[in-house]
Amino acid sequence: AQSVTQLDSHVSVSEGTPVLLRCNYSSSYSPSLFWYVQHPNKGLQLLLKYTSAATLVKGINGFEAEFKKSETSFHLTKPSAHMSDAAEYFCVVSVQYGGSQGNLIFGKGTKLSVKP
Amino acid sequence: DGGITQSPKYLFRKEGQNVTLSCEQNLNHDAMYWYRQDPGQGLRLIYYSQIVNDFQKGDIAEGYSVSREKKESFPLTVTSAQKNPTAFYLCASSIEASGGYNEQFFGPGTRLTVL
C-alpha cells in the first residue's frame, strides 16, 4: 500500500530565505508523486509532479523537488521565499495498483508562513 | 475558460437536512472525485467516478451519496446520516482514473456549515 508522510505541520521562514518542506513516501511500486499548494479557502493547484523521468523536478513559481529512492523522500524546495508563497502544501502519491489505481493519497499538509 | 466550478462557495444548513453540492467541469475529463478537508487532516476521498453512470466509494463514503448522469457533472449529497458534515468540500477531475501520471484538477471548494 502507498502512503505519504509530511514531516512538519508548520514551517516558518523569512522572506528571501530558502524553503524546505519535507515529505517521505511508502510505495511497493515506482510511485507517481505530486506537490499541490492551497491558498486559504481556495482549491488546490498543482506545483509539480514526478513520473519516473528526471529525479529533479521543476515546478511553477520557482519550486522544485528531488525524488530520492534510497531515502524514499520527495522534499520540496525553493531558493528564496516570497510573501505570496504563504499557503498550505500537500505531498501526494498516486495509487499504482488495484481497483482504485490513479486515486491520490494526500499527506496531512504543511502550512508555510513567510515573515517580512 | 476550461475548469471546474463548484457552487455555492458557502452553504449553511440546519442539522437533519440533506444538502446537495454542485460540481461541473468542462475539461472533458472522464474521472471525477469528491474530497472532504478538515483542519490538520489533509484531503480524504468520499466518492469517485471513473466514467458516466458509474461511481465508487472512497475512504469516508458513509452519510454521502453521488450521481454521475452526465460526464460534466458530479453532484454530492450530504445526508442527515453524516454525523459531522461541517467541512470544506473539494471536487476534482482527471483525464482518466487509472493513469497514475494524470494529475487531478480541483475546483474552488464549498464550505458547508451545519447549524
Image (tube, coloured by chain):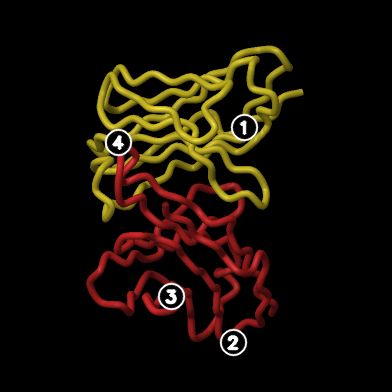
Chain colours: A red, B yellow
Looking at the rendered structure, the kind of residue marked 4 is: Ala
Picture residue at 73% right of the left edge, 17% below the top: B15
**Which chain is disc 2 placed on?**
A
Crowd around label 1: few <14 · some 14–19 · many ≥20 (10 Å): few
Labels 4 and 2 within one chain? no
From the top left corner, tell me how far across and down residue B5 is, in percent: 42, 35
Residue where numbered disc 4 is placed: B31
In the displayed structure image, the side of residue A6 where residue A26 appears, left or right: left
Picture residue at 68% right of the left edge, 24% below the top: B12
Element on which disc 4 rests: strand
Crowd around label 3: few <14 · some 14–19 · many ≥20 (10 Å): many
- Distance from Cα at disc 3 to Cα at disc 4: 28 Å
- Distance from Cα at disc 3 to Cα at disc 2: 13 Å
Residue where numbered disc 3 is placed: A63
Q: Which mark is residue A74?
A: none
**Which chain is disc 4 placed on?**
B
In the displayed structure image, the side of residue B14 where residue A43 appears, left or right: left
- Distance from Cα at disc 3 to Cα at disc 1: 31 Å
Label 2 vs label 1, nearer the camera: 2
- Distance from Cα at disc 2 to Cα at disc 1: 36 Å
Residue where numbered disc 2 is placed: A17
